[in-house]
Amino acid sequence: AQKITQTQPGMFVQEKEAVTLDCTYDTSDPSYGLFWYKQPSSGEMIFLIYQGSYDQQNATEGRYSLNFQKARKSANLVISASQLGDSAMYFCAMREGRGSGYSTLTFGKGTMLLVSP
Amino acid sequence: DAGVTQSPTHLIKTRGQQVTLRCSPKSGHDTVSWYQQALGQGPQFIFQYYEEEERQRGNFPDRFSGHQFPNYSSELNVNALLLGDSALYLCASSFFRGPTEAFFGQGTRLTVV
């Protein structure tokens, strides 16, 4: 079974509008972390935001927020006030277990976001 | 503060050849993980190195091997290249214990012809 599912292959949004990118996950580990990365055409994976499974509040980083619904196993990324530079691939990823040691990232297939003027 | 650096950025090899990719982690990080990203897919975990040992390995054949040096830098070696090995190879560095996020390099795009 897919551990990370991103059902939107592509999303279109107009500049200055908000957009939500969907991510659902599957794990039986009570301790896990959820990440969103942005990958522009240059290839580098840019870390955006992190949510731990025990975090009580939704994570926010500037224009990025993570809508974490634990019971539904969803971790949607919300980008407010989209900018042209936000056009890129966006990947949701999960780390199972506590801490960085012995744990690796499992990625979804990604969502391509295109922001139009 | 330099981030994760990878070399080379692009590489073209012939089937059957061997290739070595290099990664220098972000300053202070002690763990390096390698990922393969095929076109149109998300990255797939290859293996992770900490204290110069392979700690975790994904579902990749033995043709894929690696090394970590005392300065935490790492190499990924692929032997007997196949056309299907063509991909973007990403290196990620992190702390083995501590802050959770991994930082990625810009990747090495390998084309096997």
Image: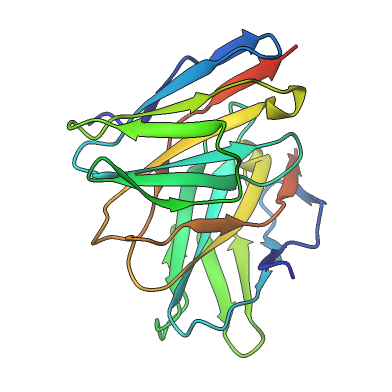
Answer with the quarter of the image where residue A108 lies: bottom right
Q: Residue B30: in sight, yes or no? A: yes
Residue A70 vs residue B60, the one in the foreground: B60
Looking at the picture, the colour scheme in use is rainbow
Does residue A53 lie above or below B44 as drawn? Answer: below
Using the rendered image of the protein, determine whether residue A59 is visible from the camera's viewpoint. Answer: no
- Judge whether A69 appears above or below A47 on screen: below
Q: Is residue A33 left or right of residue B112?
A: left
A24 displayed left or right of B103:
right
Q: Tell which of B51 and A82 is nearer to you.
A: B51
For image coordinates 50% across by 81% down, the residue present is: A29
**Left or right position of A8 against B82:** right
Residue A12: image location, x then y, percent: 81, 49
Q: Position of residue B110 (x, y in %)?
A: 62, 20
Q: Check the image and report above or below for A81 versus A96.
A: above
Residue A43 is situated, as x and y percent measured from the top left of the image, at 58, 30
Q: Is residue A7 left or right of residue A108?
A: right
Residue B109 in which image quadrant:
top right
Residue furthest bottom as drawn: A71
Residue placed most toward the observer, A67 or B67: B67
- Who's the residue at 27% across and 29% down the image? B2
The image quadrant where one finds the N terminus of chain A is: bottom right
Q: Position of residue A116 (x, y in %)?
A: 77, 40
Q: Quadrant of the C terminus of chain A?
A: top right
- Along the line of sight, which residue is nearer the eye, B53 or B27? B53
Residue drawn at 56 percent across, 78 percent down: A68
Q: Residue at x 21, y 36 (%)?
A: B27
